[in-house]
Image (tube, rainbow, N blue to C red):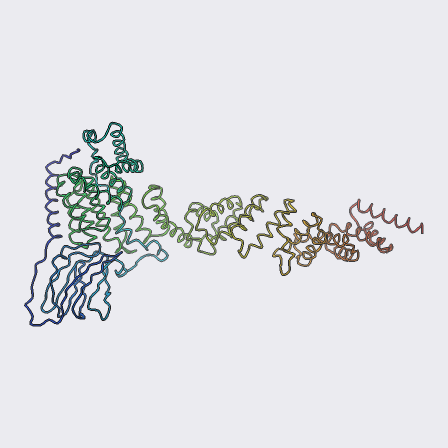
Amino acid sequence: MLFCRCGIGALTRNVMLAKAMLLVLSAVFAVAALFPAPAQASIPNRVFRVDIRPKQGYTRIILRLQENPQFTVASLPGNRLRLTLQDTDGPLFHKYRRYSDASIGGLLFSRCGSNLQVTFRAASGTGWRDATVDGTCAIALDVGTKFAPAPPRLYIAGRERIWNGVEKLVRDFDPPLKTDIPFVPTDRQILKNILNDSDQQAFMAAEAALYKGSLTEAEEAFTQFASRLSAVRPLALYRLGETWYKLQKYPQALAAFREAEKIWPAFLTFNPSVTFYYGDSIARSGDLAGARVLLARLIARLADKKYAPTLLVRLADILTRQGHDREALAIYRTVADNFPDNKANQMAQLRLADRDFLRATPWDYQRLSDLYLNISRQNSDVDMREEALFKHVLLHAIHGDASDALQQVVSFQKRFPRGVYVTVCRTIREVLVAQVYHESNWRKDAPGLIRFVEEHQDYLAACMDAPDFLPEVAKAYDEAARPIELIKFFSTLLDHQWVGTNGPYLYEEIASNADLLGDSALAEKTLRAFLRKYPTHPRARLMLERLGGVYFMGGKYQEARDTLLWLLNKKERAQRSESYYYLGRSLWEQKGAAQAGKAMDLYIATAGRDAKDAHLLPDAYYVAASARLAAGDRKGALRILDAGIKLPDNERNEEFLYKAGEITALEGKKQVARAYFEQVVKKGKDDDWKRLAQQAIESLDVGAAKR
């Protein structure tokens, strides 16, 4: 076993601490003096039973009386409540003076004249409600944190998500405590008496794993030993409880400790670290009174050790939860004032600072923030250094400038990337990122906006609530001419669950920029993903049209046909007129002349006159005419060709004239056919069409001569 040597100064301080501890404990366990009132000739009501029922988040006190009660409830200094029952008598229920749980403690019944009074402590941060049912001969009073009046919330607007839960985080967040009590491995001689050689090695290896922090390995080994009905079982249960405590499996740890204590209670007298874990597990289970007694005995036994002040701070934590604020405050101040070179000093200072956290405002938080920062810088314990620095950062996140607070959060995350506050920091950063975005003018700083969103790309959840956020980001990438980077960034955003309803917009923008880059494979993949994830989205039909266009441009006529054929159904209308063209051309390539003609008619009827339509319209007219010709409708084909000939800037005009001449000749209208061919010869610019037209004229002349 390891021992600590203390100098005269340390011993003196320990003696002082022990005295202070005894004073505090005596105050906690003190029995208030009774002041009996003179007997009354006749008191109309009487209490005959008291029930105390701890519940989740509060405790219910029930007083049962002979008649309907008349009573009042008053708040007293020191977190105390007093229930006064008028014209009531009854037993003084001494057994409840030492009662304590997470919400109340120390019920003192006393007489004051003809009234009966019940005075008790309420835990810090609790409130009360009257749960009495009218008409019943009973009083029901609920005391707990859920009934506490909400403290005034002084924080900067927009940071409500940061503030919500701060009280519970600062006051109740309680990770496993490192006491600095030396780890004491089991004596080899003890193991020799109860285990064979191989099991001895296995048990020592499990203890080594526990010491090094390989808790999963230790848990598996000790669980196996604890399952044996042999002499090693209680020892294994103690070690298993210690392992579970460090894994934050507190109910399992407590069960293991209690089972082990039944078999080998003496073990606790010479292993203080296990005793502490046992006591702390009791406290975390809600049995604060039992934990207080066990820790008080442990502190008395270890008063000359350097880690005794740490245990005393833990005792003060328990007293705080029991509502004994004055006693806890006395312990914190005693440790903070008398042990400057001890880890417990920083622990006590941290607890004292926490008492002021919720009272900080945007005007005075800096002093408390600096105190946390100083504690963090002076502390050698990694966990405490992280906790103090986090609270320094948290104060700035609640009350400070958004941009400065954001940088502090980012710095904290880099310093403690796997710390216990990872989840909380994510929420804080998301809120601050959104606030910095809204407070900044990005309209003339597209590169700055791009840098900002890329740096915080995993923390944009709150920004997504702003309807203009993603369009503004897309606009910034467009102004910077960086479509590849936009695709990469938006693709990264799609990996986050918080994208929510913004997913369709991201897919659409990725597809658009892929089109811009000529990456048809990515465009096709993205559009298909959109349709698979959002088949009923209002823009799903438009995405179907775009996908059909991608297929067509890639020469996948069958896929284009299958994707766009629904456009020919009744009451369907394309949102992009060119979709009719892609469908018609694909059908023509697949030998579907009749449907191709119908699709091209729809395109001709809905097309505009922009550059894209000007490019596609001539071919649409030609396919429409060819479809009619294939169906034997020469007049219809000729009508379509004549309309196509009148198109402005029709680069295929010679082809249209020649085709019209051919159809007219077949109809036997030789002079009209000659007129079409002569227009090609006289006005045409393409030598091939001019030559063909001249040959057609000569054929007409030969035919006429023969007749």
Query: Is 11 above or below relative to 91?
Result: above
Q: Is residue 520 left or right of residue 298?
A: right
* Side of 40 where 265 appears, left or right: right
Farthest residue, direction top: 197
**183 vs 192, nearest the viewer:** 192
Question: 453 or 265: nearer the eye?
Answer: 265
Q: Please indicate, yes or no, whether residue 592 appears anywhere in the rendered image.
A: yes
Snapshot quadrant of residue 399: bottom left
Q: Is residue 265 above or below residue 646?
A: above
Tell me: residue 182, above or below residue 35. above
Along the viewing direction, whichever of 665 and 104 lies nearer the viewer = 104
Task: Pinpoint residue 706: horizontal percent, then vertical percent.
Answer: 94, 49
680 relative to 197, above or below:
below
Residue 75, position as x, y percentages in the image: 18, 63
Estimate the x, y position of residue 329 in percent, counting from the top left. Answer: 17, 51
State the residue lying farthest toward the front: 229
- The image quadrant where one finds the N terminus is top left
Can see residue 649? no
Give percent across and percent down for residue 374: 25, 44
Image check: 127 left or right of 676? left
* 325 or 343, nearer to the observer: 325
